[in-house]
Each structure stands twice: as C-alpha cells, then as structure tokens.
Image (cartoon, rainbow, N blue to C red):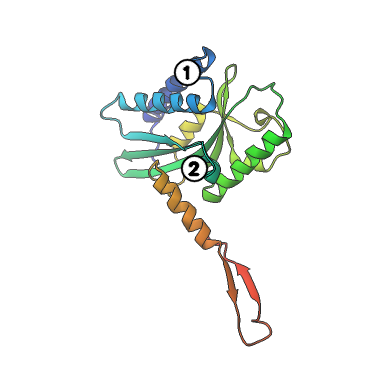
C-alpha cells in the first residue's frame, strides 16, 4: 500500500491499547482461559477501531467453536479468524488471517503431546491459508505471534523459543500489507468453509483408466491451488 506513517502509527496505537487491556484482564484473573482471553482481545480491538467514525480501516474477527466432535476448531485448526479492510484514496484491500491461541509462559515446560497437537493444528490451518499464525498469551511477556510454518518446521519446544513478533508489530505489518490472505475477505465461517472446500476439491485423487499399459491404473493428485 502507499506509505502513510500517520495512519500506520494510529493503527498500531489502537492495537497496543487493546492488547494492554486484554493482558491486564489476564493478569488480574478476569480472563483465564484461552477462549476468554481471545474474546477480550477481539472485543478491545474492535472497540478501539470503532472509536473513530471516519477511520479508513475496519477490523473484524470471529472465534470458532471449540466444543464437540465436529467443532470448527478441530476441523480448521484455528481459534479465530481476523479480517482487515483498508480503503484509502487509490487503495482498497480486504484480507485476513487464521490464528490458534496458546496461553503459555516462556519458562513453562511444553510436553511433546501438546507440541504435537499444536503442530497438527498449524498444519490444518496451513492447508487453508499460508497466512496462519499462533498467538502466544503471556502475563509476563505480553502477546506475541509465531508463524504457523515456523511451528511445523521446528523440533519439539516451547513456542516462545521460535521467532516471534510482538502483537503490535504483527498488526502493523498486517496493516502495511506484508501479512494477509486476500481470500479471507470477511471474518466468517462461510469464508473459511469456501476456501476449505476449494482446497479439498483441488487435492482430489483422480483415477484414469485407458486401453494402453501406460494409462492403466494411472493415479495422481492435483495439487494446484
């Protein structure tokens, strides 16, 4: 997008303020579990964004269901989806990302079973979008973000050992268009369903049977996205 340090700074300040409030809620026990912390963070960000009626950017998010055998989180690996729209003179974009949330401190032990579960969740998100991330919630280090690709590429470890960005910097780069999937135009389950179904259709197994020896039993996967 066109350089606009004034708007970029304003956006980052809003995110910083929202994150600080959510961290305070977590530190004081008003939000103790990951879903509650995520809901607080989303609510505070949306509240900050709505303060300015004439803002050229809007941000929306929704949490995915995490209960039951066929919950949305189990299917997609994500806890929430965020979507940003920027509408400036000569520039208009809608894009979003998927995120899994983990409440963990830098010095906490992280069992292999938990890391394997996180890896599986990241793989599920990456099947839908390369713009997939893990949000780390810490009372002492604040909120930070790890790329899902970094998790699936690493050995078993506490996620804080991986390369992270402070949440304010992550959203700053989201605003500046270094981060975001244009297919995630709206933060809705319909959007994710649509991308997921297209992914499944494009990785279907195709069996071709012909008369020649070379054609008989030919089977391949179509992986183009």
Where disc 2 sits, the SS reads helix
Residue receiving disc 2: 72
43 left or right of 202?
left
Q: Position of residue 106 (x, y in %)?
A: 66, 22
**Total numbered circles:** 2
Please name the residue shown 60% across and 16% down the image.
140
Residue count near mark 2 (Cα–Cα under 10 Å), binned few <14, some 14–19, many ≥20? many
Residue toward you, 222 or 121: 121
Residue most extreme to the left: 53
Res. 12 image quadrant: top left
Please name the residue shown 67% across and 34% down the image.
114
Residue 186 visible in the displayed image: yes
Query: Compared with residue 28, is residue 18 higher up or lower down, i.e. above or below?
Result: below
Residue 182 visible in the displayed image: no
Q: Position of residue 174 (x, y in %)?
A: 46, 36
Location of the N terminus by quadrant is top left
Foreground mark, 1 or 2, reads 2
Res. 203 image quadrant: bottom right
52 left or right of 67?
left
Query: Compared with residue 10, is residue 29 higher up or lower down, i.e. above or below?
Result: above
Going from N to C along the chain, the mark reached first, 1 or 2, is: 1
Residue most extreme to the bottom: 211
Residue toward you, 218 or 148: 218
41 left or right of 205?
left
Q: Position of residue 110 (x, y in %)?
A: 70, 28
Q: Position of residue 95 (x, y in %)?
A: 41, 43
Q: Which mark is residue 20?
A: 1
* Cβ atoms under marks 1 and 2 closer than 8 Å: no
Q: CA distance from mark 1 to mark 2?
A: 28 Å
Res. 142 image quadrant: top right
Where disc 1 sits, the SS reads helix
């Amino acid at each position: 997008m066109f350089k606009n340090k004034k708007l970029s700074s304003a956006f980052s300040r809003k995110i910083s303020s929202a994150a600080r409030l959510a961290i305070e809620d977590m530190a004081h026990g008003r939000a103790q579990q990951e879903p509650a912390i995520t809901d607080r963070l989303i609510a505070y960000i949306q509240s900050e964004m709505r303060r300015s009626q004439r803002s050229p950017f809007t941000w929306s998010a929704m949490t995915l269901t995490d209960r039951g055998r066929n919950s949305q989180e189990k299917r997609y690996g994500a806890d929430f989806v965020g979507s940003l729209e920027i509408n400036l003179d000569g520039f208009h974009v809608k894009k979003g990302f998927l995120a899994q949330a983990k409440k963990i401190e830098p010095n906490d032990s992280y069992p292999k079973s938990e890391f394997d579960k996180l890896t599986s969740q990241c793989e599920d998100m990456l099947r839908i979008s390369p713009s997939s991330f893990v949000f780390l919630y810490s009372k002492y280090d604040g909120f930070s973000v790890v790329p899902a690709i970094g998790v699936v590429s690493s050995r078993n470890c506490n996620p804080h050992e991986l390369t992270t960005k402070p949440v304010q910097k992550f959203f700053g780069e989201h605003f500046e268009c270094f981060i975001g999937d244009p297919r995630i135009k709206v933060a809705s389950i319909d959007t994710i369903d649509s991308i997921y179904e297209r992914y499944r259709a494009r990785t279907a197994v195709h069996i071709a049977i012909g008369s020649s020896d070379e054609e008989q039993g030919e089977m391949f996967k179509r992986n183009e996205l």
